[in-house]
Amino acid sequence: MPNQARVAKVLATLLASMTSGAVVLMALGHNPPSAGPFSLWTYQRLDPVRNAISSDTAQSRGRWNRIEIHYSGTRTGNVEQLSSLNGLARPDGINCHFCLCNGLGGSDGDIQPTEKWQKQLSAAPGQAWYGSGRTIRICLISDGKVTYPTDCQIKRLQVLVEALRERFDIDPEAIDYPGDWR
């Protein structure tokens, strides 16, 4: 008999906590959290990755064989802002194929293809990069010192890298992350 009393107490407590939780959720309504490390609502409103990796120029399966991810060296930005900065920009546009915004200059997790990607052009080797003409460069908006990639940037980067790997048959070992990647 003592077990039945215990079971009844547990069920009553469970019912009360579920009811109070439901009341709290209904009171919150359809408003997404104002801030936080990651919100599914903000993630779902971003454009699908397949839209980002499409280009104006025809793509061939063997065109790319490596992926390199690097920090922009800035705390904020997007493709347009980076294109106007000395050192990151070149006469033919920013020297990467994609930028992943951190919410400061573009929506958090927004994948912005560059003109190089749209035209399927190679990135030019420079001081901090010596990749081949078949390397896809992805720029994470972050300085890697004070600001680090957001959770949304990391999730979107994982999806972008996987989509590029599948589309161009890139070996998982041919992906280079920043040296202090967590």
Image (spheres, rainbow, N blue to C red):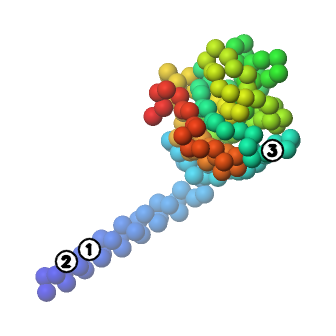
Q: Quadrant of the C terminus?
A: top left
On screen, residue 7 versus residue 60, left or right, reads left
The residue nearer to you, when weighing 55 against 72, is 55
Visible residue check, residue 73: yes
The Cα–Cα distance between marks 3 and 1, rounded to whole angstroms, is 60 Å
Tell me the element at label 1. helix
> Could you tell me the amino acid type at mark 3?
Gln
Q: Residue at x 80, y 31 (%)?
A: 121
Tell me the element at label 3. loop
On screen, residue 21 versus residue 53, left or right, reads left
Q: Quadrant of residue 94?
A: top right
On screen, residue 69 versus residue 96, left or right, reads left
- Which of disc 1 and disc 3 is earlier in sequence? 1
Instruction: Give the residue at mark 2.
Output: 6
Q: Where does residue 59 sit, x and y in percent of width and height?
A: 80, 44
Crowding near the residue tagged with mark 3, few <14, some 14–19, many ≥20 C-alpha atoms within 10 Å: some
The Cα–Cα distance between marks 3 and 2, rounded to whole angstroms, is 66 Å
Tell me the element at label 2. helix
